[in-house]
């Protein structure tokens, strides 16, 4: 059962918080209907929040920030603050984000860090990601980013790879770029492709490079196409390598479109020229 159906069933049962969470999950996976349905339960969530539900308040704040227009910002701030003051981890993380960015409230990085830390200690993976980004302690930052990644947050793996790269820990960095790429992070796909092309953190591997350049296409990102063409045109792969890259990327058709760019192998006739012995 998909998240939209889960949300509809929860709404039919009057469980508006469960419905909202399900609709948000669908929206995060790219469903426009999920975003519309999430906005559709805000009235019920507001009633629950007014009755003292910190979970409803935190969820309502997130929905308003993500899917409503700017006029909803004051309401989102108020709901996030209420949830944070009630000790709700998602509310702490959301209000911490507002403090860190100065969105609707005066910027307060110290306050944001305190809230992120409280939420991360309660097990909120996005708070761990945010605190990992904010922390000046290298070891703490790496540990927090790993924690968030291990809980499935793909962007945490990409940020972790960036941090490891800045420390010249290239093999580890490549591992996390690939980890995030495998979970659909297009920035990590591009980074992994470039690193395999150039031999950072590993020996050059043009098949893996073209694989990740092509994989970006499934997410509507064609930035790697010209890079893939350049590798093929330059002779870094033969036909088998191109087809292998396409298979690994899950896009054999895109790989097929690269085949005309393979360098032409000259025959003896081409070398001697017509009419010559």
Image (cartoon, rainbow, N blue to C red):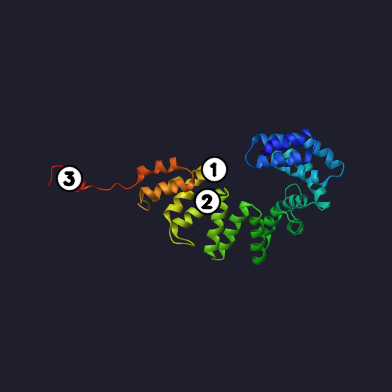
> How far apart in space, not on screen, are marks 3 and 2 (Cα)?
45 Å
Identified at 72% across, 48% down, the residue is 103
Disc 2 packing (10 Å; few <14; some 14–19; many ≥20): many
Query: Looking at the figure, which quarter contains the N terminus?
Result: top right
- Local secondary structure at mark 1: helix
Above or below — where is 31 with respect to 155?
above
Residue topped by disc 2: 189
* Residue 94 placement, left or right of 145: right
Q: Quadrant of residue 274?
A: top left
- Local secondary structure at mark 2: helix
- Local secondary structure at mark 3: loop
x%, y% of residue 132?
A: 67, 59
Residue topped by disc 1: 219
Tell me whether the residue at label 2 lies in contact with that at label 1, contact meaning CB atoms closer than 8 angstroms.
Answer: yes
x%, y% of residue 7?
A: 72, 37
> How far apart in space, not on screen, are marks 1 and 3 (Cα)?
47 Å
Whichever of labels 1 and 3 marks the residue nearer the N terminus, that label is 1
């Amino acid at each position: 059962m998909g998240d939209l159906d889960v949300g509809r069933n929860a709404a039919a049962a009057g469980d508006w918080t469960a419905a909202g969470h399900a609709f948000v999950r669908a929206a995060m996976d790219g469903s426009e209907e999920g975003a519309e349905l999430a906005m559709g339960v805000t009235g019920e969530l507001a009633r629950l929040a007014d009755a003292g539900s910190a979970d409803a308040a935190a969820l309502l704040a997130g929905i308003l920030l993500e899917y409503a227009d700017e006029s909803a910002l004051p309401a989102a701030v108020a709901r996030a603050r209420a949830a944070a003051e009630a000790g709700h981890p998602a509310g702490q993380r959301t209000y911490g984000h507002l403090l860190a960015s100065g969105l609707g409230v005066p910027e307060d990085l110290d306050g944001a860090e305190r809230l992120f830390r409280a939420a991360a200690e309660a097990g909120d993976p996005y708070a761990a990601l945010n605190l990992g980004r904010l922390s000046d302690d290298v070891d703490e930052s790496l540990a927090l980013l790993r924690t968030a990644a291990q809980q499935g947050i793909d962007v945490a793996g990409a940020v972790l790879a960036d941090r490891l790269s800045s420390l010249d820990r290239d093999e580890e960095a490549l591992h996390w770029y690939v980890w995030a790429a495998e979970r659909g992070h297009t920035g990590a796909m591009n980074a992994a492709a470039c690193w395999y092309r150039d031999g950072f953190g590993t020996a050059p591997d043009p098949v893996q490079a073209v694989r990740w350049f092509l994989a970006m296409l499934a997410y509507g990102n064609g930035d790697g196409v010209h890079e893939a063409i350049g590798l093929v045109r330059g002779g870094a792969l033969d036909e088998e390598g191109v087809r292998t890259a396409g298979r690994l990327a899950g896009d054999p058709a895109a790989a097929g479109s690269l085949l005309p760019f393979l360098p032409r192998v000259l025959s003896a006739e081409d070398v001697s020229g017509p009419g010559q012995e």
